[in-house]
Image: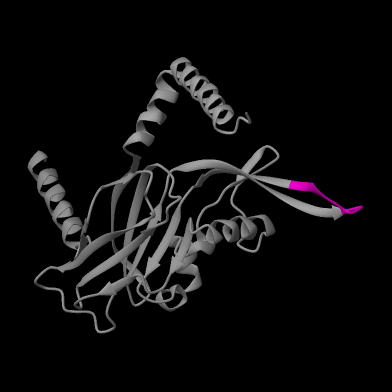
């Protein structure tokens, strides 16, 4: 009886393994650097992602080619967006919305426009494009994402796009060969410090077939890092030095501009 059960179990296991879909294609990616140092003369930088679409021996090339979607997400933070109205000649805040745990930096980079890569349902499910990124809002006691047409959401994205902190580029990914690609990740001078996540999706014929992730970090370096570390680790010393510098600056100004 035990032998019969063992044999049945072996047959079921073999059938399940045979019926499971094999990973015919997968992604291999590499970054030009994994750490960006921000100094006093930092004016922005382009981080380069290299990638390759690997296939097993039994997989034939896709007739329609591949599509790549690179989503870069910066450290998360809580933001408040306010709506102003002009009343009696004065601009006042009439409403506000809090975005909870929202990326400080967000870039969606593709090899062609997102509406040509996949259907709207697929883009919504895979969060392809700025319109379908999760930007949860605090509304009363509830925290949830809203429709892309929400006025506060559209204003929040528009402001960040103006500051180059939110980006959607349809020509940032270039295929060097049918299987080899590169993506330029533009980081502005105001890029926030922290850890950044990179999500790379491989699509073909409008369907997701492979996915991989990586990360890099942005740090302060040089004199800026010393100042930041002192302010956080030794606040009393930082305050004392700041006060002394203010007194010294005031004294020097009185000497230079003194009228005899």
* Residue at the image point whose x is 23% and y is 51% from the top: 33
Residue name at image x 23 percent, y 80 percent? 62
Vertical arrangement, residue 56 with respect to residue 37, above or below: below
Q: Nearer the viewer, residue 190 or 101?
A: 190
Which secondary structure class fits the magenta region best? strand
Who is closer to the viewer here, 213 or 22? 213
Q: In percent of the image, x 35 and y 70: which residue is there?
A: 172
Q: Quadrant of the C terminus?
A: top right
Question: Is residue 243 one of those drawn in magenta?
Answer: no
Give the percent coordinates (x, y) of residue 171: 37, 74
Region in magenta: 87-95
Quarter of the view holding residue 185: bottom left
Asked whether residue 88 is drawn in magenta, I would say yes
**Count of numbered badges drawn on the protein:** 0
Across and down, in percent, residue 69 comes to 36, 66
Using the image as rendered, state which of residue 37 and residue 116 is in the foreground: 37
């Amino acid at each position: 009886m035990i032998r019969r059960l063992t044999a049945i179990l072996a047959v079921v296991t073999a059938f399940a393994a045979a019926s499971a879909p094999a990973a015919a294609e997968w992604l291999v990616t590499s970054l030009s650097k994994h750490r960006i140092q921000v100094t006093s003369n930092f004016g922005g930088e382009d981080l380069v992602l290299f990638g390759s679409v690997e296939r097993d021996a039994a997989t034939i090339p896709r007739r329609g080619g591949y599509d790549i979607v690179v989503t870069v997400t910066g450290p998360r933070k809580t933001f408040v967006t306010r709506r102003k109205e002009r009343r009696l000649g004065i601009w006042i805040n009439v409403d506000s919305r809090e975005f909870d745990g929202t990326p400080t930096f967000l870039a969606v980079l593709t090899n062609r426009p997102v509406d040509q890569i996949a259907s709207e349902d697929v883009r919504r499910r895979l969060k392809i494009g700025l319109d379908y990124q999760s930007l949860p809002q605090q509304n009363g006691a509830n925290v949830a994402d809203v429709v892309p047409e929400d006025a506060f959401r559209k204003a929040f994205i528009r402001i960040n796009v103006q500051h180059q902190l939110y980006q959607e580029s349809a020509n940032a990914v270039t295929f060097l060969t049918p299987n080899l690609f590169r993506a330029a990740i533009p980081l502005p001078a105001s890029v926030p410090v922290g850890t950044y996540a990179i999500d790379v999706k491989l699509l073909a014929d409008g369907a997701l077939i492979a996915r991989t992730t990586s990360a890099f970090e942005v740090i302060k370096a040089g004199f800026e890092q010393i100042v930041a570390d002192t302010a956080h680790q030794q606040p009393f010393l930082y305050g004392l030095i700041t006060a002394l510098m203010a007194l010294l600056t005031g004294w020097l100004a009185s000497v230079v501009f003194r009228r005899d």
